[in-house]
Amino acid sequence: MIERHVAAAQVQRFEGLDWFPREKGAALTELVKAMQSAPNEIVAEHITSELVHAARECPKPADLYRMIGQEREKLETATNNCRACNGTGMHIITRTIKGIEYSGATDCECRQRKTA
């Protein structure tokens, strides 16, 4: 489980999506709680980036819980002693496109080998 301020920062990235809850209240609180259920910050960033890049509408808490659950299952296949990901099953990659640096999380090779 990740800290509340980290989860809140990830949820704030959904602000540009349709149906993002603009008012502070139960809807926003539930999105943050759902994001807090991520096993680590890398998973939270991965899910957030995936949604921001592909979705037009803000996810519902149920969507986040489902996606986090799927990532949690994948983590179980990661190699605990992997030097690339330290057992998280994911690692951060950075790419520069037209002079702008982008970063995101991707599956580690140790996890890909086990699921193949």
Image: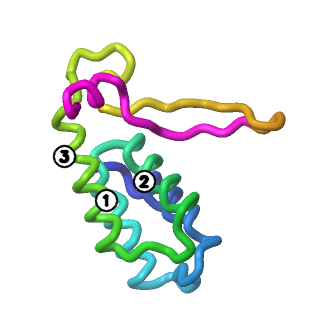
Question: Which residues make up the magenta segment?
Answer: 101-116
Q: Nearer the viewer, residue 47 or 24?
A: 47
Residue at 23 percent across and 29 percent down: it is: 78
Q: Secondary structure at mark 2?
A: helix
> Where is mark 2, residue-wise?
47
Marks 3 and 1 sit apart, C-alpha to C-alpha, by 10 Å
Residue at 72 percent across and 32 percent down: it is: 96
Marks 2 and 3 sit apart, C-alpha to C-alpha, by 14 Å
> Where is mark 3, residue-wise?
73
Residue at 52 percent across and 52 percent down: it is: 49
Q: Secondary structure at mark 1?
A: helix
What percent of the width, then of the height, locates residue 69?
Answer: 23, 56
Q: Is residue 40 above or below residue 86?
A: below
| Mark 3 Cα shell of 10 Å, populated few (<14), some (14-19), many (≥20) | few
Q: Nearer the viewer, residue 14 or 66?
A: 66
Q: Is residue 56 above or below residue 9?
A: below
Quadrant in the picture for the C terminus: top left
Residue 81: name its quadrant: top left
> Where is mark 1, residue-wise?
67
Marks 2 and 1 sit apart, C-alpha to C-alpha, by 7 Å
The amino acid type, in three-letter code, at marker 1 is: Met
Q: Earlier in the sequence, mark 2 or mark 1?
A: 2
The amino acid type, in three-letter code, at marker 3 is: Glu
Q: Do the residues under discs 2 and 1 have CB atoms within 8 angstroms?
A: yes
Residue at 21 percent across and 22 percent down: it is: 79
